[in-house]
Image: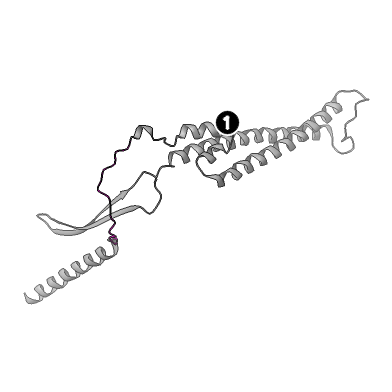
Amino acid sequence: MQSFLTIFFRLFSIKWSLLFILLFYFTPSLIAQSKDSTKIVIDTSRIIKHAPQKAAFLSACLPGLGQAYNKKYWKIPIVYAGIGTVTFLGISNAKNYNDFKLAYKYRTDLDPLTIDNYVNKFQDEDLLTIKNYYRRNLELCYIIGFAVYALNIIDATVDAHLFEFDMSDDISMLAYPLFFASSNQNGAGINLTFKINSSKK
């Protein structure tokens, strides 16, 4: 009987020691801050909120303008780098497509006076294959260009939705011990409560 009580008290002390350690590590330091108890009435109807619709409209009118509205200026060079790359590739593929299209037309018009620039370099089938290759690349550039334009609008809209969300360290956590008992067993735990301020200062 004495050994049973000894084991019981040892387990009980270990259990409370673990609970104390958990409370020590998970409970944040309390910093006393003086707050003015005077209530200030604010007319929220006059507060201009950050509008996602406006950000989307600005980016649709001029890519990058919605990012400037969201104060994400570092994204503007990325937007124009994507647009510039797609534009350069589109112009290059359009030039090559028109060149080989004209060459294939001269080759197959049965007019001896029209001579293309690839007489001794490519056969008729080669000209057709190369022409179709650049045509597909040109169509792909159109698709990618539209995707970049759409992503520019989506990015501005999402950033505008998250503009007033507080990502600072002003997040409080409250931890306190929790004890519960039932007919079968007793237990203890920790209750953690988080409070996130969703308004941007």
> Which residue is depicted at the point 41% across and 36% down?
49
Q: What stretch is highlighted in magenta?
A: 28-42
Is 148 positioned to the left or the right of 94 in the image?
left
Q: Identify the coloring.
A: one colour
Relative image position of residue 200 (x, y in whole percent): 39, 45
Q: In this view, does 176 lie above or below 92?
A: below
Q: In this view, does 125 lie above or below 109?
A: below
Q: Is mark 1 on a helix, strand or loop?
A: helix
Prevalent SS, magenta region? loop
Q: Name the residue under label 1.
A: 61
Q: Which amino acid does label 1 sit on?
A: Cys
Q: Nearer the viewer, residue 66 or 140?
A: 66
> Which residue is depicted at the point 12% across and 70% down?
8
Relative image position of residue 99 (x, y in whole percent): 81, 32
Residue 197 forms part of the magenta stretch? no
Label 1 environment density (alpha carbons within 10 Å; few <14, some 14–19, many ≥20): few
Is 44 positioned to the left or the right of 179 in the image?
right
Q: Which residue lies furthest to the left in this view?
A: 1
